[in-house]
Amino acid sequence: MGRKLKKIVRSSYTGYIDCMTEVAKIVTKFINQPLAEMIDTVDMKTKEMIENLAGCLLIEEDISKEFVAALKYTDLLCLIDNTRIYPSEDDYKERPLYYYSIDAELPKPPFRYLGIGDICILLKNAEKTNNTVKLFLAINVNSLFAYLKSISNEGVYFNVWTTLLERTEALDIDIGADTSIRDILNQAEVSWVTWKPWKAIRDYYNKVLFVFDLYSCLLIDCFRYAYPERFRMNYIIDQYSHGKEDN
C-alpha cells in the first residue's frame, strides 16, 4: 500500500475525506469491487447471508444461484433495486389503525428493504478488514453527492439529495460540514433500534421506513443516478444467463 493511501486510511479512522480527487478514486474503486472479493473479508455468517440474498435474487430472474461468485458489487445493488418480490397486494390497501389479534398478519415492507439492510451489515463487517470499504464510509456526505453530481446529472442532487435531507431532518440527524457516510448510517441505526412503550408504535413503524429510505439514498439510489449503465437488468440477465462465468 502506498504512503498516500496509508495516510488516507489513517484519516478515515478519526475524521472524514472531502478531497474531491480522493473521493473520485475511492468511489470508483468501491463500485468496481467484485462481490466475492468483498464478502471474502467478512465473517462466515455475513458471507452466507449475502450469498443467500444474491442467490434468491438471481433465481428470481431465472438465473442459477451458482453465478453468485461472478457478480460484481453493483450487480447486487441492481438486483436489490429491481426486485419484484413484494408483499401481497393487500399490504398496499388502506392499513387499519389497529389489529385485533396477535396472530394477525401485519404489513410487511418490500423484500428490497431486506436487501438494503443486508448491504448495511455487509459494509459494517467489511470495513474491519477491507480498506476500500473503510475509505468509502469515511467520505464526507456533501463531497460524495457533489462528486456524483459532477459526473451525472441534476437528478442526483434534486431527487436523491432532497430525499436524504428530508429523511435526516425527520430523524433528527444532522448533516454537518464534517459528516461522513459512516456517521449518517450509525446515527440512522441508533434512531430506530429502540422503542419506548409510551411512544406510538405507528410512529416507530414509520421511522423504520424512513431509516431504510435514508439507507437507500446513500447506498443505492445515488449510484443508480450516477451510473445508470450499471443498473440495467436486461444487461445483468444477459450477462449471467448464458453461462458467462468468466466476466
Image (spheres, rainbow, N blue to C red):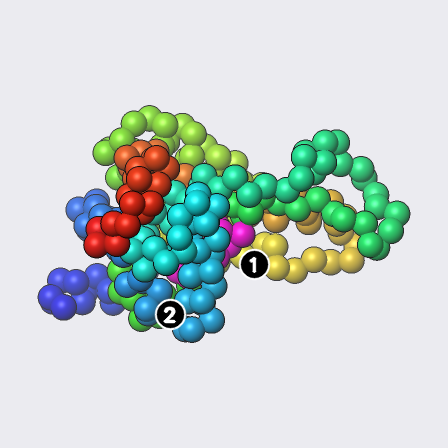
Determine which residue is flagged by label 1: 190
Is 115 magenta? The answer is yes
Could you classify mark 2 by the number of other residues whose Cα lies within 10 Å: few (under 14), some (14-19), or many (20 or more)? many
Q: Residue at x 47, y 63 (%)?
A: 49
Range of residues picked out in magenta: 114-123
Q: Residue at x 61, y 59 (%)?
A: 193
Q: Residue at x 47, y 60 (%)?
A: 52
At mark 2, the secondary structure is loop
Q: In the orientation shown, which residue stands out farthest toward the left?
A: 2
Is residue 143 visible in the rendered structure shown here? Answer: no
Figure check: 116 above or below 223:
below
Q: Quadrant of the N terminus?
A: bottom left
Q: What amino acid type is highlighted by mark number 1?
A: Val
Q: Nearer the viewer, residue 247 or 28?
A: 247
At mark 1, the secondary structure is helix
Image quarter of residue 229: top left
Residue 36 location (% of width, % of height): 31, 62
Could you classify mark 1 by the number of other residues whose Cα lies within 10 Å: few (under 14), some (14-19), or many (20 or more)? few
Determine which residue is flagged by label 2: 42
Residue 152 location (% of width, % of height): 27, 31
Figure check: 199 above or below 10:
above
Q: Residue at x 48, y 53 (%)?
A: 56
**Along the horizontal axis of the image, is 140 left or right of 60?**
left
Q: In the orientation shown, which residue stands out farthest toward the right?
A: 100
Q: Nearer the viewer, residue 191 or 72?
A: 72
Q: What amino acid type is highlighted by mark number 2?
A: Val
Residue 105 location (% of width, % of height): 76, 48
